[in-house]
Image (cartoon, rainbow, N blue to C red):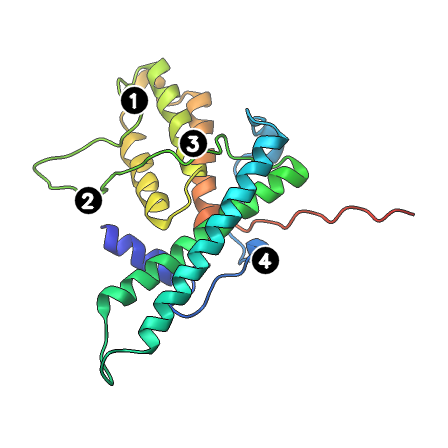
Amino acid sequence: MIAACLGLAIAGPGCPGPGALPPAHPGAQAEAPHSTLADEDAEPPSYGKPELRRALIGERAAEATLERRIGDIEARLADPPAPGATNPALEDQLRVATADLAVRRRFIATLELCEAAGRWCPPRLDDPPWAFDPDPDPGRPSDPPLTASLRYDLDSWRQIASELHGRACACRTIACVESVGVAIDALEPRPMPAVQGDDQAAAAITRGRECLFRLRGKKAIPAPAAPAADP
């Protein structure tokens, strides 16, 4: 499933193929499904402007590192050891790195919009460890690596939904985007019937999915408005 998800993500809108880097500012992407939540419904972030600026500096440095890596891979592919030779492993590295760069650039775009307009701010700025195989051995199923307790009563489900929202919006790689989406789909039906319709948890899950839509390139991210010129 991971390979299939990566293939779809790379071939789909917003993820260019090998040799073509995605745009630095993806605000002009194709129209995507409308949000089910108004922007003003979003909760304010728990961090301030200084933390946001530091995060932007770090993310832009990571973006430049990934660009250099892609350039190095392309150079190695352009100079094969023998005429007509192919290197499937290297080509796969290029596809994944290109998709990762597209996701990271969209994450940076959301941080820029948060800084400029206070909109679409991710709940967290850290990059929490996330190692989840959405297609494990059928005989050894595994749960997503959440810190929230997987009890699925009201309090537990609200904590799970909140953590999934935060982790979805914090993704910087295509593997994270795809596997968090699978985790949301797997966990959403599990709460006790009495709490499945809880508004607080439902809003968190919806916001998490919207973050994944943006990071996949399926929902446009508007560029921050330019500051008004002095008269």
Label 2 to label 3, Cα distance in Å?
21 Å
Query: What residue sits right under mark 2 in the picture?
Result: 135
Residue 218 is at least partly visible in this image: no
Query: What residue sits right under mark 4 in the picture?
Result: 28
Label 4 to label 1, Cα distance in Å?
38 Å
* Residue type for callout 4: Ala
Q: Secondary structure at mark 1?
A: loop
Mark 4 vs 1, N-terminal side: 4
Residue under the image location 30 percent in, 36 percent down: 183
Q: Is residue 130 left or right of residue 43?
A: left
Mark 1 vs 2, N-terminal side: 2
Q: Secondary structure at mark 2?
A: loop
Mark 2 vs 4, N-terminal side: 4
- The location of residue 161, given as percent across then percent down, is 38, 26
* Residue type for callout 1: Pro
Dots 4 and 1: beta carbons under 8 Å? no
Query: Which dot, 3 or 1, sits closer to the camera?
Result: 3
Q: Is residue 106 left or right of residue 70?
A: right
Foreground of the two, 62 or 121: 62
Q: Secondary structure at mark 3?
A: helix
Mark 3 vs 1, N-terminal side: 3
Mark 3 vs 4, N-terminal side: 4
* Residue type for callout 2: Asp
Vertical arrangement, residue 146 with respect to residue 16, above or below: above
Foreground of the two, 37 or 103: 103
- The location of residue 1, given as percent across then percent down, is 22, 50
Residue 200 is at least partly visible in this image: yes
**Mark 4: few/some/many CA within 10 Å (<14, 14-19, 20+):** few
Q: Secondary structure at mark 4?
A: helix
Mark 2 vs 3, N-terminal side: 2
Query: What residue sits right under mark 3 in the picture?
Result: 165
Query: What residue sits right under mark 1 in the picture?
Result: 191
